[in-house]
Amino acid sequence: MSNPGNMTDKEKTSAPQAAHSGARALRGDAFYPKLLAAAVLLFLAAAVACCLGSSSIPFHKVVSYFIGKTESLSSSEILIIGRIRLPRTITSLLVGGALASVGCIMQGVFRNPMADPSVLGISSGSALGAAIMIVLGFNGVIIGTGFTGAYIGAIAGALVTWLAVFYIARSSGEYDTTSTLIAGIAISSIMSALITVLMTLHHESMERIYMWMLGTFSSATVQKTWVLFAVVGVLVPVLVLIAPRIDVLKLGREAALSLGVNQSRTLGIVLCISSVLLAFCVANSGIIGFVGLIIPHIVEYFRIHRMRRKLIMSFMTGAIFMVVCDCIAKTVVSPGEMAIGAMTSLIGAPYFLILLIKSRVTAGRKGIR
Amino acid sequence: MKRKILSLALVLCMSLSCFAACSKEGDKAEETEAAFEAFEYTDFYGNKVTIDKEPQKVVSVSPALTEIIFELGAGDKLVGRTDYCDYPDDALKVESVGEIVSPDIEKIASLEPDIVLASSMFSEESYNALKDLGITVVVIRDEVTLDGMLSVISDTGLLIGEKKAGEELAAKMKEELDKLGTGEVADDAPSVYYVTGFGEYGEYTPGEGTFIDDIIKAGGAKNAGAAAVNWSFSLEALIEADPDYILIPAWGYDQFISTEPYSSLSAVKNGNVIIVDPNIFERQGPRNLEAVQVIRDIVDSADAQDLAA
């Protein structure tokens, strides 16, 4: 169902877009310099992340590890840098990037600024899958795979949830944004309720299910990181490829169709790819809220408007943000750790609110509302 | 102050009159009632609770207290326990009132207990709800040392009207603890890391100042996770500490010894990962002796290896 009303709503609620919509057509969005800046920042953040941790390995040793001179390092230092810090940094980078990209494309395709990865119920479905495996006692590594029961359960749970949303949302023969959103929200609450039921019936596993959902990047292993890298490395570029279709969809369903873009099919593809991405994100790091919702809104402030560029920028910003959050999460109460999900909201939300207030003030001064 | 004295006097008068009333009744009642002295107990919330007759029906909202009550030989007084109370086997025959934090208040009320005993996990809402119903409820503070645990045992004995048994058990346990170790940790003592969570669940271990930390020290070993903050630890710190022995609950054993980077730890390579029953470490009570024994055995076998080497 095409709903032009939604679009104007978004224009209204999204202050910076309203404030700068006039200027954007005339000026370029200086995308490449911004992308370069983001890439440099991401590299720096990742480098810092590799140097930070509860064990104090001097900076020069970290450098010598990366340039291949490992003779001066003890075996535990090699283990800490190569098997703990590096996989952890790359995992947080990929998860942050993927969550932000999924959030960005969902807000585009649903034309709803409140859309985020959690509305489809994929995250809760994933957590339910993990909880079932924990309760069934598949605690060890599943033989032959090298992955834990909770990890496999999370991926299976996400895919089953996606199939359910897919089936219900398509029941009229075509995808439609409103019924997909509503189906997603309904399924999400069913999944959360089932987790609660499981936790109540299995007290002995309650703590572990809860701790699993809180999420941590500390369980990143080399193998899991490679798998995640492959998934994100293939699927995010696919999202980038189909992103221009979302711009066309803004014109309305009929107009888009006449330009060769089928709303239903585009929605179907986006949902499928997003679900797989989310499945692997949640399996790697538990449920991390906020990033998928807010990062695309922060990207709005960079005055980039085409979906493809916005998506790339969301990936970069999400990645930087997550790496920074994880650095704080692992150092602030060292040698303990903060839950990463709490960190993202605690750091990101105030920053976003400041941006929001600032832009409102400038818009007010210019007489634009 | 005046008010306090007044209320104390009042309590005294009331209990005296109770004695007087009782003594008029049968001889048997006189005996049991006379043996019981009314007393006041200050609980976890700082509230003074007056116990003026021997409790006959007890509800325990803590698995640790349930174990203590059975060990004191007062299992027949227990009319309610929690879902978690799984030791000893006889505890399972007692009706459950739900979980530890906010149990089923209606269920507890229907059991008409003389006293409800809870640990500091018990929520204040439940505490107030029970008090409003006029039920005597006492929250016993969780202790962080073995000495504290002994006082939990004697306090529990006192509160359920088994004062003597409580004191005796505490004294007996004190003796056995002293036999197991002096509580002094040698410089070359092996280090032990106690796993409460790891991997996907985050690294959790009891740090300095926790009850389990005290058990490890009492057994004569070093706690490799002493630096943990509120039980939270990090993988890096664990790799760096590279403990000699690792204690882990059964659910985590396979995953721990087969996943990188845990599998690179010396304890895993040397086969020094030991499955333990977390209940003997985490619940405060008689079975803590077994926990100290586990640590003692580790220290002794490490010494034997040193001698052989």
Image (spheres, rainbow, N blue to C red):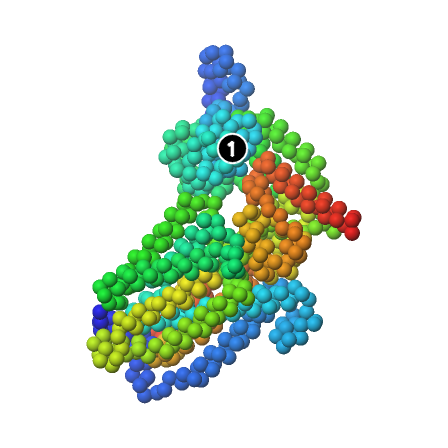
Of residues A138 and A117, which is closer to you in this image?
A138
Of residues A231 and A301, which is closer to you in this image?
A231
Q: Where, by quadrant of the figure, is residue B292 drawn?
A: top right
Q: Visible in this render: residue B109?
A: yes
x, y percent for residue A158: 39, 60
Image point 69% across, 38% down: which residue?
B180
Q: Find the residue positioned furthest to the front.
A: A144
- Give the labeled residue for mark 1: B89
Image point 49% across, 32% down: which residue?
B91
Q: Visible in this render: residue B151?
A: no
x, y percent for residue B64: 53, 37
x, y percent for residue A231: 44, 69
Amino acid type indicated by mark 1: Asp
Q: B155 left or right of A185?
A: right
| SS category of the residue bearing label 1 | helix
Image point 49% across, 15% down: which residue?
B29
The 10 Å Cα crowd at callout 1, few under 14, some 14 to 19, many 20 or more, is: few
x, y percent for residue A196: 39, 49
Q: A176 left or right of A50?
A: left
Instruction: State how many labels appear.
Output: 1
Q: B245 left or right of A227?
A: right
Image point 42% across, 41% down: which residue?
B102
Question: Height in image: A286 above or below A44?
Answer: above
Query: The numbered mark 1 sits on a residue in which chain?
Result: B
Of residues B117 and B241, which is closer to you in this image?
B241
Question: Height in image: A136 above or below A228?
Answer: above
Q: Find the residue positioned furthest to the bottom.
A: A26
Q: Where, by quadrant of the figure, is residue A59 drawn?
A: bottom right
Question: Height in image: B123 above or below B257?
Answer: above
